[in-house]
């Protein structure tokens, strides 16, 4: 590549031109003179700002180097109080395995505990805490590669399952066990499961978490269940061979008992529900309120709530 400010002869001799119109040789670091020039620019800018951190992008433009090189000199100044000669730069540890010369087993131990403390922690946070806790200097790209290669499972980022705080209260767990004892005694062809879902969840909560590097599982992220809704989806599923496996409907705005009942009516008219079916729902108010009571009488459906239900007439 070439720049309008430099002749093409630069590239003819095997050199490159960076975005700030500086000349460099690929794979080789700048010399000691350039390091001193960048350090002087950093110190001058810092003094002018009264001790604040200067903008490394602007320093890179002034000295015609990349921002990463300015960042390197800034770290040397912070750690040693000056820039180092080539013969003063400490040698890296020799470690086999992924990302060698960067991280050892103790670093991996610290990284794993930082992950368990907060699965949604950013790579920059790992960099800061490794520096504070054990003095290890490592780049974000190295950490990303380390998560993918150094543990039994690749710890990649993914969208978490959102779990409301109150899902696992002791009384709910006891009712869930009671539910399993009852539902296991019913003809599975009679059972249809239903629920609804807001279609705006991804916009409301967009944070990703990293998979556990020791077991490959993606941890849930606990949050409240109060999402702002735009569209809602109500769906039912079952294994009855007389109907389709899934029926669903989408409507505007939030879901309520009226909209839920309308979707059930559509499912009934389409042949998904049959008289005598048992519809299993969670304990949302729209499932147990007045608008849904006609379903039992009008269509012969038995409504079963996962957490609040009665045993009578389920086994008849």
Image (spheres, rainbow, N blue to C red):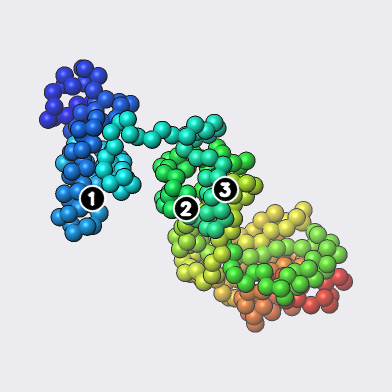
| Badge 2 or badge 1: first in the primary sequence | 1
Secondary structure at badge 3 equals helix
| Contact (Cβ within 8 Å) of mark 3 with mark 1 | no
| Badge 3 or badge 2: first in the primary sequence | 3
Mark 2, residue position: 133
Image spot of residue 91 (x, y percent): 41, 33
Secondary structure at badge 1 equals loop
**Res 114 visible:** yes
Residue at the spot 47% in from the left edge and 49% down from the top edge: 134
Cα–Cα gap, marks 3 and 1: 34 Å
Give the side of residue 316 with respect to residue 129, left or right.
right
Classify 86 as above or below 217. above
Classify 12 as above or below 190. above
| Badge 3 or badge 1: first in the primary sequence | 1
Mark 1, residue position: 55
Cα–Cα gap, marks 2 and 1: 27 Å
Give the side of residue 315 with respect to residue 28, left or right.
right
Nearer-the-camera pick, 56 or 184:
56
Mark 3, residue position: 109
């Amino acid at each position: 590549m070439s720049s309008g400010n430099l002749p093409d002869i630069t590239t003819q001799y095997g050199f490159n031109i960076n975005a700030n119109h500086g000349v460099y040789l690929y794979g080789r670091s700048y010399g000691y003179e350039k390091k001193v020039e960048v350090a002087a620019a950093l110190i001058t800018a810092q003094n002018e700002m009264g001790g604040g951190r200067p903008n490394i992008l602007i320093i890179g433009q002034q000295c015609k180097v990349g921002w990463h090189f300015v960042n390197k000199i800034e770290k040397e100044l912070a750690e040693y109080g000056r820039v180092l000669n080539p013969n003063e730069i400490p040698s890296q540890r020799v470690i086999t395995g992924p990302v060698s010369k960067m991280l050892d087993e103790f670093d991996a131990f610290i990284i794993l505990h930082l992950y368990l403390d907060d699965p949604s922690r950013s790579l920059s946070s790992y960099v800061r805490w490794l520096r504070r806790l054990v003095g290890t200097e490592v780049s974000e790209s190295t950490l990303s590669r380390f998560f993918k290669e150094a543990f039994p499972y690749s710890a990649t980022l993914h969208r978490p399952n959102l779990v409301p705080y109150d899902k696992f209260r002791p009384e709910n767990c006891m009712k869930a066990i009671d539910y399993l004892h009852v539902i296991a005694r019913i003809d599975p062809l009679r059972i249809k499961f239903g629920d609804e879902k807001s279609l705006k969840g991804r916009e409301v909560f967009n944070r990703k978490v990293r998979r556990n590097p020791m077991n490959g599982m993606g941890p849930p992220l606990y949050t409240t269940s109060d999402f702002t809704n735009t569209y809602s989806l109500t769906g039912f599923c079952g294994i009855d061979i007389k109907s389709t496996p899934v029926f669903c409907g989408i409507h505007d705005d939030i879901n309520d008992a009226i909209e839920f009942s309308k979707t059930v009516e559509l499912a009934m008219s389409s042949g998904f529900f049959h008289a005598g079916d048992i519809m299993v729902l969670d304990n949302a108010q729209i499932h147990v309120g007045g608008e849904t009571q006609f379903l039992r009488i009008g269509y012969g459906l038995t409504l079963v709530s996962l957490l609040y239900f009665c045993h009578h007439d389920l086994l008849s």
